[in-house]
Amino acid sequence: MAVSENITERITTIAEEVAREPLYVVEVSVRGQQGSHVVDIYVDSDEVLTIESLAKASREIGFLLETQDVIDGKYKLNVSSPGVDRPLTIPRQYAKNVGRKVVVRWKEPGHKPARGTIIRADDQGFEIELENRETKSIAYGDAKEVKILLPW
């Protein structure tokens, strides 16, 4: 049985209430079935994200999930940072990563991935400086996936 959108929405609302400035929720996913659900909540920060802030958010979210009886049965709660291996998904992440190198994979088939450095980001899209020094403005809807490139 698939997890209902209602449960995911309720968990997202709780996570967003807990993740106050400078924290913000990047993604919430609920998988599994009754009695063995796994709740993954990815949280980021405009500042340095510390283990202590993640632990505090995890405790508060877990407490609210229990007291509001959001999930029937047992479940496992994972609250973590998205990490550099996960794609950027919300505009706030792009702004945080200005100055970092990324690879952009396009929604439209047939286009080669673009590599460059994020030089600007706003609510509509972002701009990268390509390896050949040209700049390219990209609407968020045009990118299928944008990942940070590690420097090594």
Image (spheres, grey):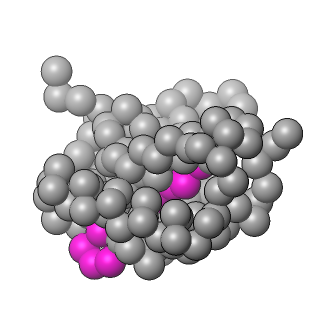
Q: Is 118 in front, or is 74?
A: 74
Which residue occupies 46% across, 52% down?
A: 41
Q: Is 102 in front, or is 69?
A: 69
Q: Quadrant of the C terminus?
A: top left
Vertical side of 91 occupied by 75: above or below: above
Q: Find residue 94 and report its horizontal and vertical position in percent.
A: 36, 58
Q: Find residue 69 and report its horizontal and vertical position in percent.
A: 62, 66
Q: Which residues are magenta?
A: 20-29
Q: Find residue 89 and report its horizontal and vertical position in percent.
A: 49, 53
Q: Find residue 84 and report its horizontal and vertical position in percent.
A: 32, 37
Left or right: where does residue 50 sit relative to residue 27? left
Q: Is 45 in front, or is 50?
A: 50
Vertical side of 75 occupied by 23: above or below: below
Vertical side of 54 occupied by 65: above or below: below
* Magenta stretch encompasses residue 109: no
Query: Which quadrant would residue 62 be assigned to in this image?
Result: bottom left
Q: Quadrant of the N terminus?
A: top right
Which residue occupies 52% across, 63% down?
A: 66
Left or right: where does residue 96 sit relative to residue 122? left
Query: Looking at this rendering, what residue extends furthest in the right direction?
Result: 1
Main SS class of the magenta portion in the image = strand
